Image (spheres, helix red, strand yellow):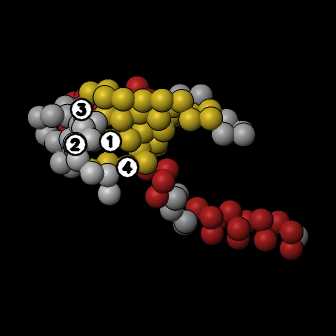
């Protein structure tokens, strides 16, 4: 009886706890990409494979020259993408040429 009461209290208590904030930043890749395209006019800019001991994820950078926004996504093998960074004033980098003269 006491065991059932404890389980019931824990269940009701857990229902009142909101999910972690990070959960709101993840979703099916297709849905995340569609939002980036339609809301921010972003397109795929760069990406790569991130390998750890336990898994591999795709790192993607989406950006828009029109809005100046950018988004960094991590996509897991199961097709879930998470926004790990986003911002404004995006710019593309270029390699800086060395200056002739005396090395400092």
- The residue identified by callout 2 is 100
Q: How far apart are the two marked residues, 3 and 4, measured between alpha carbons?
A: 14 Å
Q: Is residue 26 left or right of residue 52?
A: left
The residue that label 4 is drawn on is 85
What residue is drawn where x is 32% and y is 41%? Answer: 71
Residue at 48% x, 29% y: name it: 48
Q: Earlier in the sequence, mark 2 or mark 4?
A: 4
Of helix, strand and loop, which one carries label 3?
A: loop
> Are the residues at dot 3 and dot 4 in contact (C-beta closer than 8 Å)?
no
- Dot 2: element: loop
Q: Between disc 2 and disc 1, whose residue precedes?
A: 1
Is the Cβ of the residue at disc 2 closer than 8 Å to that at disc 1?
A: no
For the residue pair 56 and 100, the one nearer the viewer reads as 100
Left or right of residue 25: residue 69: left
Residue placed under numbered mark 1 in the picture: 71
Res 16 quadrant in image: bottom right
* Inter-mark Cα distance, 2 to 1: 37 Å
């Amino acid at each position: 009886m006491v065991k059932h009461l404890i389980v019931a209290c824990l269940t009701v208590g857990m229902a009142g706890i909101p999910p972690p904030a990070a959960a709101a930043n993840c979703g099916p890749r297709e849905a995340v990409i569609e939002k980036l395209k339609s809301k921010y006019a972003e397109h795929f800019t760069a990406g790569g494979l991130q390998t750890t001991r336990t898994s591999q994820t795709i790192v993607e950078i989406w950006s828009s020259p029109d809005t100046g926004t950018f988004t960094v996504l991590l996509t897991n093998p199961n097709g879930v993408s998470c926004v790990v960074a986003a911002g404004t004033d995006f710019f593309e980098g270029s390699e800086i040429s060395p200056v002739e003269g005396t090395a400092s």
